[in-house]
Every structure is written in C-alpha cells, then in structure tokens.
Amino acid sequence: MSEGECVAEASADPSTAAPLANPAPRSPQWLGDLLLLGALWGASFLFMRIGAAEFGAVPTAAVRVAIAACTLLPILLLRGQWSTLRQHWKPALGIGILNSGLPFALFSFALLSINSGLAAVINATVPMFGALVAWAWFGDRPDGSRIAGLVIGFSGVAMLAGRSAGFHSGADEAAVPWAIAACLGACVCYAFSASLTRRHLAGVPVLATATGSQVGATLFLALPALWLWPVQMPGPKAWAALFAVGTACTALAYILFFRLIERAGPARALTVTFAVPVFAIFYGAVLLDEAITHWMLGSAAVIVCGVALSSGLIRIGRRRPSSA
C-alpha cells in the first residue's frame, strides 16, 4: 500500500474507516502524526529521484517494494496475521501491482526528467481520480461542488504541463510530456487500486493488505528489474535513499497513516494530501537545488483547491439547515 493509494481509499469512501474514526480527537496529538506523515511521504519523491538516477526507474521501484515487504513481513508475523494474508493472498498480491508496482515505476521514470516537487504536486490529484473512478465503478455521482473541484484540479495540471517549470535543466524536451503522463498514469493506478481494495479486501486487516501488496509488487517487478539492472553498481547514496524510502516512507508511513485515521478520522487524515507537496518542494529546493517558480506555486495552489473540493473536504453553496 502506498501514499497515493491510501489517500485515494480514504477519500473514495470515508465510511469504510468509520469504525476507526474519532470525529473529536481528545488531544492535538494527531496533528503531529499528520505533519510527520506529510514529511515522510514528501521525502519519498526526493529519495526516488536520487535512487532512479543510478538504478533506473524499474529497479528503483523493485528495490523500494522489496525493502518495504521485508520490513512489514516480520511485523505481520509478530501480530499473528499470517493466516489472514494467506486467506486473501490472491487479491492482496494482485492489487499490489496497481497500488505499488506500476505507480512506483512510473514515478521513478518521471523523476528522471522532472523535479520531485512537481511530481508530488501531480500526486496530489489522486483524490480527484479516486472520485472519478468511484463515480464510474460504484455509481457514486459527485455533486456540483466536487465536479467543480475536478475541473479546477485538472486545470491546474494543465497549467503545470504547459510550462517547463519543475523540469530538470538538462531534461530532453521530448521526454517531459511522457514524464507528466507517467505521473498521471500512476495517479490513475492508485485510484483503481483503491476501488479494487474496497471490492475485494473490505474488512481485511490493513497490515495484511499492505504486506501482501508489497510482496505482490516485488514479485511483479523482480524479473523486469533484473533485466534492467544497471551495469555499474549504484553507490551508497542511492542504496541509502532506497532503504529510506522502503522503510520510512512506505512501511512506517502506512502504519502512521492508519493510526491517523484511528485518532482523527478519515476526513482529517485526508488533509495530508496538502502537506505532502509542501514538504516535497521544500526538500527538493534545499537538498537538490530544485528551482521553485511562481508559476509552479500558482499551479500547485489551483490543484490543491481542486483536490479540496473534489474530495469533499470543502464545499461551495452548501446550505445550513434552518432551525425550527
């Protein structure tokens, strides 16, 4: 399970997490979890860019999910949920292709041409794609406010794609549209995986689902990664980046996300969507000297507004019930 898939699942149907939700947290401790989760998921784009530069796209994704699977499996065994995973292994492993294997490879490919901050901004559109898939798959027709959010959000993506803000200085111009398309393709994968999870893994403990998905993604990417493995062994910096993204930004972050749902409820947990691009842009600017332009920030603001509307976090034209 990944950052985009987690957010898409929470936004697509908050009621699925209702038994865990606490609509009135007793303490502001959930705010710390929210910021830490945003920091971890924001860093994932930084680490993937560092890793992809030496490993290549597919090996980067394969190493990430393999490390995450190795981290989660012992926790699964310690909590006695191996039998649960064995019972639901087919859908869990299959969904892992869509919620981790393909999107991680697509983002790693995109980060060879675009900056980590830009990729994180596009990743924030996952709730919008989740709303579209929920509409087509479950007949959950969005209201006027959500439709407006979809239009606004995708307009922000078009604004980003229309200029070179956020692209590597030495990037091939022909590769840039493919990088944008890869990011959007990853978001679509997250949206579909959330709907598949709701249909085939509803009620299954999250730890079993997440572990199974990482194992499935590892098996899916293993042979392509070996085939595309770099001739020159990547250096310690690249290995450290993938170890960090596999353990902290994937395994630990997923545990943190569902603890956040338990403490604050799915609606508040979904606001992490807004924090991730902020951290990613900050990391990229400070650690990788990525340029931040006014156009990029303006486009990001448009996308954030669209996500807030399309996910139902804010609504326009909502009337309050009149008192008797």
Image (spheres, helix red, strand yellow):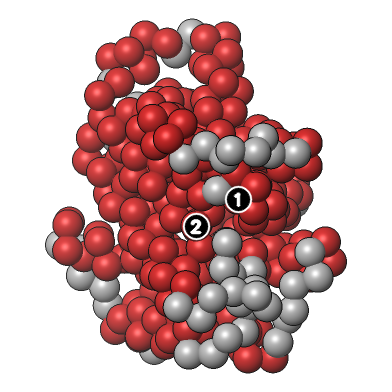
Q: Position of residue 33 (x, y in %)?
A: 70, 46
Q: Nearer the viewer, residue 114 or 200?
A: 114
Q: Which SS class for mark 2?
A: helix
Q: Nearer the viewer, residue 72 or 165?
A: 165
At a point 34% along the width and 39% down the height, the residue shown is 97
Image vertical order of residue 57 relative to residue 208, above or below: below
At a point 64% along the width and 64% down the height, the residue shown is 116
Question: With 188 as the anchor, is 295 left or right in this view?
Answer: right
Q: How many labels does the image show?
A: 2
Q: Which residue has dot 1 on it? A: 52
Q: Which residue has dot 2 on it? A: 109
At a point 47% along the width and 72% down the height, the residue shown is 175
Image vertical order of residue 65 relative to residue 16, above or below: above
Q: Which SS class for mark 1?
A: helix
Q: Which of marks 2 and 1 is nearer the N terminus?
A: 1
Q: In the image, what residue type sits under mark 2?
A: Phe
Q: Position of residue 228 (x, y in %)?
A: 46, 40
- Image marks 2 and 1: residues in contact by CB distance under 8 Å: yes
Image vertical order of residue 84 relative to residue 287, above or below: above
